[in-house]
Image: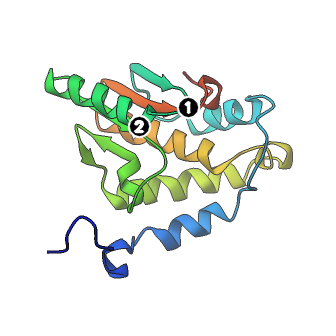
Amino acid sequence: MPSLTSTPPASLWHDSADPVVASVLSHYQQGVRREDLRAVRQLRDVLRPTAVPNYVVVVGTNGKSSTATYVARLLSAAGVRTGLYTSPHIAYWTERMLIDGVPVQEDDLLGTLRDFDAVAQSQPEPVRHSLRFFDVLSLVAEDVFGRHGVEVGVLDRKSTRLNSSH
């Protein structure tokens, strides 16, 4: 077993989701400024992701993922079905979405991502060009959590304005 200071072999870092995510990611412009949330709201209205009844949103500059993880673990330990959505991931895309500490299934994440992306790409040009990959991925997390009966979603955000629904 490698020591904590050694670099793991590259094969350990291969994520089978990368090609699918790269394909979807190519549909979205990088660095789209968030002027308003109209496009996200319109997409959300069309997609109608399965709702999660409650959210805890952790906002700030540093320590968001750690704090969100602590909150999610506390809620899960108290018997509350909890979804945790953080960004970025370390090695695997499924690390971004955990339910009670367990990564969501890759096929569930990727299937929902493909479906939601197809709907996003079918929107009128002004909507489509205003969307970011993160917008679609956030709606995917909401839907996956809702379908799996999550009672509280814990979200790691740079700003509360990044998600139109919460």
Above or below residue 162? Residue 90 is: below
Left or right: 124, with 161 as reference point? right
Measuring from the top left, give residue 11's x and y in whole percent: 34, 81
* Residue 12 on image: x %, y %: 31, 75
Image vertical order of residue 58 relative to residue 20, above or below = above
Residue at screen point 20% across, 69% down? 3
Q: Which residue is mark 2?
A: 65
Q: Secondary structure at mark 1?
A: loop
**Where residue 122 sits in the image (x, y, percent)?**
72, 53
- The answer to whether the residue labelled 1 contacts the one labelled 2, judged by CB atoms less than 8 Å apart, is no
Quarter of the figure with residue 56: top left
Residue 31, x across and y down, in percent: 76, 50
| Residue 34 appears left or right of 165 | right
Q: Amino acid at mark 1?
A: Thr
Q: Is residue 117 left or right of residue 10?
A: right
In the rendered image, the residue lying farthest to the right is: 126
> Label 1 crowding class (10 Å Cα cut-off): few <14, some 14-19, many 20+?
few
Q: CA distance from mark 1 to mark 2?
A: 10 Å
Q: Residue at x 30, y 25 (%)?
A: 71
Q: Residue furthest front?
A: 5
Q: Residue at x 84, y 49 (%)?
A: 125
Q: Secondary structure at mark 2?
A: helix
- Residue 61: numbered disc: 1
Task: From the viewer's side, name the closer residue of 97 and 108.
Answer: 97
Q: Quadrant of residue 118?
A: bottom right
Where's the N terminus, which quadrant? bottom left
